[in-house]
Amino acid sequence: MAAWSERLAGVRGVLLDISGVLYDGGEGGGAAIAGSVEAVARLKRSRLKVRFCTNESQKSRVDLVGLLRRLGFDVSEGEVTAPAPAACLILKQRGLRPHLLVHDGVRSEFDQIDTSNPNCVVIADAGEGFSYRNMNKAFQVLMELEKPVLFSLGKGRYYKETSGLMLDVGPYMKALEYACGIKAEVVGKPSPEFFKSALQEMGVEAHEAIMIGDDIVGDVGGAQRYGMRALQVRTGKFSPQRRASRRAQMSQQTKIDPLQGGLCGAADILMLSAKPRAPLPSALWEDVWKKMSRRSFFSRPFRLKLRGLNTGSKRSYK
Amino acid sequence: MAAWSERLAGVRGVLLDISGVLYDGGEGGGAAIAGSVEAVARLKRSRLKVRFCTNESQKSRVDLVGLLRRLGFDVSEGEVTAPAPAACLILKQRGLRPHLLVHDGVRSEFDQIDTSNPNCVVIADAGEGFSYRNMNKAFQVLMELEKPVLFSLGKGRYYKETSGLMLDVGPYMKALEYACGIKAEVVGKPSPEFFKSALQEMGVEAHEAIMIGDDIVGDVGGAQRYGMRALQVRTGKFSPQRRASRRAQMSQQTKIDPLQGGLCGAADILMLSAKPRAPLPSALWEDVWKKMSRRSFFSRPFRLKLRGLNTGSKRSYK
């Protein structure tokens, strides 16, 4: 336990990824990940500040929050940092008029943006909207500009829906980068500006914050490069094989903690380690302890470590 | 002229790119580029060996040759090196069963290939076939393989149709590479194996051959890396602005000749410089000379150099 409490010392704020951590998208809106509704509620009841930091770019914030609330989550629009509103700010600041290659579900976020006579391209996770015709149109707009400017709302490689893995916006960003010989500006994780704005909204410094996500690049690597801590959950697109191969390709700088669970487990660890001023209520300990006793919940080395804890329980944890 | 005859000394064989050099594709099959039908005919009448080396992967060789013949070109199937037949050879040699993301027009080339229970993916210029659904399917097949193998028939960024620039297979190759964290195997230009097989069919060594194309990477850079000479024509997707910006991104190894015309001009230069055993017939000189006298045909520095030639003509070439 010592290691975790050291690693998480001084954490005051938690940024939660949404897709793959809270829920998996899919038919009928998708499904909450087991234990995550309760975990969000517990984190919000704790002394930790909680904010949601997503690269979701198929839905407007209103629609996303509506969906999450229907799935049982306690979340409001003001608690969500998302790339489309961030992109709108940048477009206004720089006087840019975008050609939009985005999902119909997020188009309303750009209602106040002038899209006539475009002088840049904005792409987001357009899903079926990534047709050859639409990609070619975005390409042609870029090629006609003297200095092509491409914004990509995130650069995720893929995400998980209930039906399987789905291509995210990142591959299409790479396609346009290659076709035009340019480099896109990423609005969303892992861009430092994006983490910065989420932390500012939460009123927490980077060194006091932890990011919890299922993406080793966008969530873990990005947060760590910005000076935050990070935890990768074992839900969403997580897969041990893919993590190992991805790990080999990543910067040596990205530190990956050896223990991860779903958001439910991560919440337990956070609340155990965040050193509350008052002792943890015994009911909470009991709850945590019950979960830990499930073989599949924590790794065996961690369960063995836990044996040392004085809990009064005589049960054996294999 | 000395410079050109030195640069082209010992050239015995010419590889001709097809799209953007012979014709621009588009509605109704496309249109021959001005002067190229005649240029091919002249090159084939000369002592130079001529072969066609294309990354065309929307059409089978049969269909491509049929189209070119309808446009007036003297070309037969046996003279064309194309990526789909080359890919079939590789698949057979390595016992691979592809999932095909290709244009319907080229599917017949894979008729003899087992595509059941795929253990690799082959992508080609699928045009409208590059839907989100089809890309996602190819992605999912790759992600389910322990060692994902992706073949890309060429890696061109874009090509020119009569209606404008169109995305080629390269951007989609990059998209799948990024999504899966892999590197594709390119079958087609600029792959050395592809140039090798074209030269073997022609019976000419690399140092005796020149590639003529409109793509600075696939044609010029690729051929030069394989030890061939290369000429970039000013037709097809060529644009001086794009060449300048592309040039800056390229390896210092790629040498770009300061003078290019369409295939018609390139053929003139080749035939003037290839040192025929017998003197050039005066009719041919007359023909070349007439073309050179057009202001737009050659660059001004080149026309000034030509003044030194003793032709008996008193006309001034600005």
Image (cartoon, coloured by chain):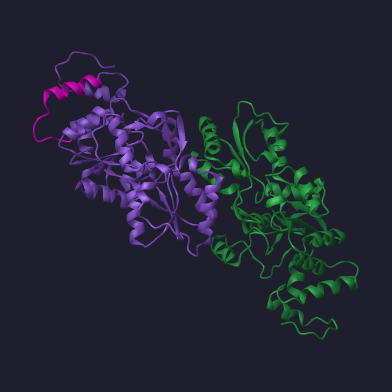
Chain colours: A purple, B green
Q: Horizontally, is B272 left or right of A85 in the view?
A: right
Image coordinates for residue A276, horizontal then vertical, percent: 12, 35
Q: Is residue A17 visible from the viewing direction of this image? A: no
Q: Is residue B25 visible from the viewing direction of this image? A: yes
Image coordinates for residue A19, horizontal then vertical, percent: 35, 36
Q: Horizontally, is B48 left or right of A215 in the view?
A: right
Image coordinates for residue A232, horizontal then vertical, percent: 33, 35
Image coordinates for residue B231, horizontal then vertical, percent: 70, 63
At 34% across and 59% down in the image, what residue appears? A92
Which quarter shows the C terminus of chain A?
top left
Q: Horizontally, is B281 left or right of A231 in the view?
A: right
Residue B143 drawn above or below residue B291: above
At 22% across and 23% down in the image, what residue appears? A306
Part of the protein shown in magenta = A274-292
Foreground residue among B21 and B12: B21
**Which residue of the protein is positioned furthest toward the bottom in this rendering?**
B314
Q: Can residue A87 be found in the magenta stretch?
A: no
